[in-house]
Image: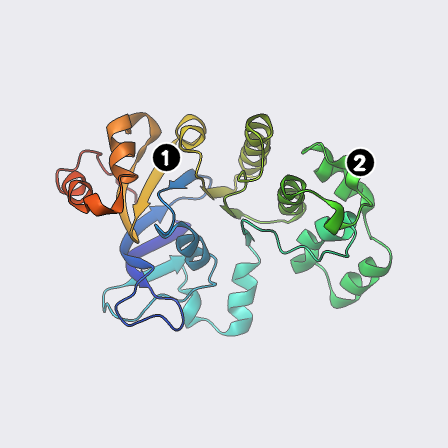
Amino acid sequence: MTILLKSVSVRHDGAAASAFALRELTLAIAQGEQVALIGPSGAGKTSLLHTMACALKPAQSQAEAQFLLYGQDPWQLSSTERHALRAKLFLAPQTPPLPPRQRVVNAVLAGALPQWSLWQAMRSLIKPIDPARAYTALSRFNLQDKLYARVDRLSGGERQRCGMARALISSAEMFLVDEPLSALDPTLAVQTLEVLQAEARARHATLICSLHQVELARAHFPRVIGLRDGRIVFDAASDQISDADIAALYRNRRDDAPVQELSAQAVVTLIPRC
């Protein structure tokens, strides 16, 4: 199993003791799966992605809590070992961390940094090591003409696609992608999603993607996880999720009771994962 969480809770640094971003989540994801995370703003989607990426450490409030990544508890490893484990992952935040004055070619090739020596990284800053590779990755998102443009000259949508091109350059076995379509028009959103999914299938990589576009999640992902208030409301095959389930997931927060009722009645059958 690639990812296993059992009764995992997460609290951000500086938050009150009772303010959990994730609350006793139990979840398992196998290598090669493609999973969409949906839910209202503040549901915990980004926190879950950052937990999986070892950027957030689970709270120690539950004795039975467990987090395993590729069969190892990353927080029981040394920092060097944890860094090596993280090299298998590519975390793509909603706003890609692209230096504004950097050329796009360098920003994209940075996806290969975990595989490069310090000397290679420094050399590539002066003269890009493999611009053809960056060009090919950009071309899959129709951005090849931006190869030598400066990052701060890109639109928000172009920056997002540049971040996705960086993912293609990486050798990651797991893509953790946070809202990659928020600045894209509907046509570009579908194209970008299809490229990501095709790349994940080609390398048998796991793809976990948070989306606000619910219909894209239901249409393109075989498994959809609905989060609300740091808890899993449903974890189901996309064809098992009804419009009523979606409406309950996004219902106004003043109407929390129906959401709890949805979970209690198990309107959506949880998919067992082993």
Tell me the kind of residue under disc 1: Arg
Tell me the kind of residue under disc 2: Asp
Which mark is drawn over residue 145?
A: 2
Which mark is drawn over residue 168?
A: none
Q: Nearer the viewer, residue 209 or 96?
A: 96
Residue displayed at 28% across by 54% down: 25
At label 2, counting other C-alpha atoms closer than 10 Å, the crowd grade (few under 14, some 14-19, many 20 or more) is: few
Q: Where is residue 96 in the image (x, y as percent from the top left)?
A: 61, 51
Is residue 66 in sight in this rendering? yes
Whole-angstrom CA distance, mark 2 to mark 1, is 35 Å
Q: Where is residue 55 in the image (x, y as percent from the top left)?
A: 48, 63
Q: Nearer the viewer, residue 42 or 193?
A: 42
Residue displayed at 18% across by 33% down: 267
Q: Which of 83 and 221 is in front in this view?
A: 221
Give the labeled residue for mark 1. 223
Q: Where is residue 90 in the image (x, y as percent from the top left)?
A: 56, 52
